[in-house]
Amino acid sequence: MNQAHAGVMTTAPTPDIYVAGLWATYDGSEFVSQGEAMMYKPPLGDDVNILPDGYSTLLGATSSGVFEMRATITADGAISDASFTVHGSLGTASTGEVVLLRGTVTEMNMAVFSTSRLLEFKVTDKDDVTGVLAPMFQSQYGGAVIKMTLQSWHYGVSPYTFTDAFGATGAANIGRPVPEPASMAIWGSVLVVGSVFSRRRNRNRLAV
């Protein structure tokens, strides 16, 4: 059974990238956010610090990389012209440009924002994710998820419009999408089938 399990889990778990000192502005159309890309968690081992590259140094970062996101977002959460980039180097600082992760943002989760004030953006096309860490995000479950926890200045009369997040500071976390229940059921059935075949092989060997 252990052998069957190892055979199914061929894709490494996607690491998280932690962003601190995040700030964001929104003028009713343009959303701009930046923060310090501090570290990422690899599939195995301890968290790895992200150091500056040429681009993050240009923006004023001295001890970390930089997360940047720009998008056009309407008050109802419709998103367009959206992309995010994580600049920084691993191991040693770099004077050149090092793109750790880049992708096109395709969706904002308004249901989450309406209830928890959490900004959640999705990069749903795994093939669109590029950069040094891209292979770790290109799993069978899609691209990346950007979750921002922001302390907002509130404007407007409705607590459920995106215009409430006009200006804010907070933190962010970039990770992989959570598998849908259907996907989990499929993989669960594969595990069961794999364990059955594994047992049959073992029985055949014992019979010989």
Image (spheres, rainbow, N blue to C red):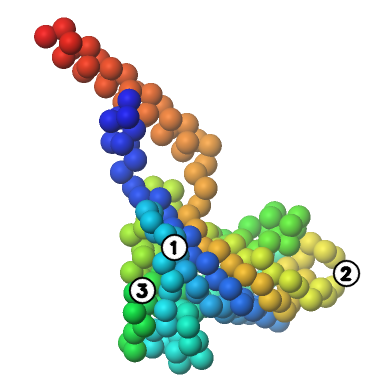
Q: Nearer the viewer, residue 64 or 31?
A: 64
Instruction: Tell me whether circle 3 and circle 2 mark residues in contact (CB < 8 Å).
Output: no
Observer-side mark, 3 or 2, equals: 3
Element carrying mark 2:
loop
Q: Residues within 10 Å of mark 3 (few under 14, many from 20)?
A: some
Q: Quadrant of residue 69?
A: bottom right
Q: State which tag comes first along the sequence, 1 or 3.
A: 1
Query: Which residue ends up furthest to the left in the rendered image?
Result: 208
Q: Residues within 10 Å of mark 2 (few under 14, many from 20)?
A: few
Q: Nearer the viewer, residue 148 or 62?
A: 62
Q: State which tag comes first along the sequence, 2 or 1.
A: 1
Observer-side mark, 2 or 1, equals: 1
- As shown in the figure, which amino acid type bears the numbered disc 3? Leu
CA–CA distance in space, label 1 to label 3: 11 Å
- As shown in the figure, which amino acid type bears the numbered disc 2? Val
Query: Which residue ends up furthest to the front in the rendered image?
Result: 46
Q: Residues within 10 Å of mark 1 (few under 14, many from 20)?
A: some
Q: Residue at x 52, y 48 (%)?
A: 178
User: Is residue 135 depicted above or below 130 in this figure?
Assistant: above
- As shown in the figure, which amino acid type bears the numbered disc 1? Asp
Question: Residue 134 in the image: x percent, y percent?
Answer: 36, 63
User: Is residue 87 depicted above or below 128 in this figure?
Assistant: below
Is residue 193 at all visible to an observer of this figure?
yes
Count of numbered circles in the view: 3
Question: Which residue position holds label 3?
Answer: 90
Question: Which residue position holds label 1?
Answer: 47
Taking the image as shown, residue 81 lies to the left or right of residue 100, namely: right
The image's mark for residue 157 is 2
Element carrying mark 3:
strand
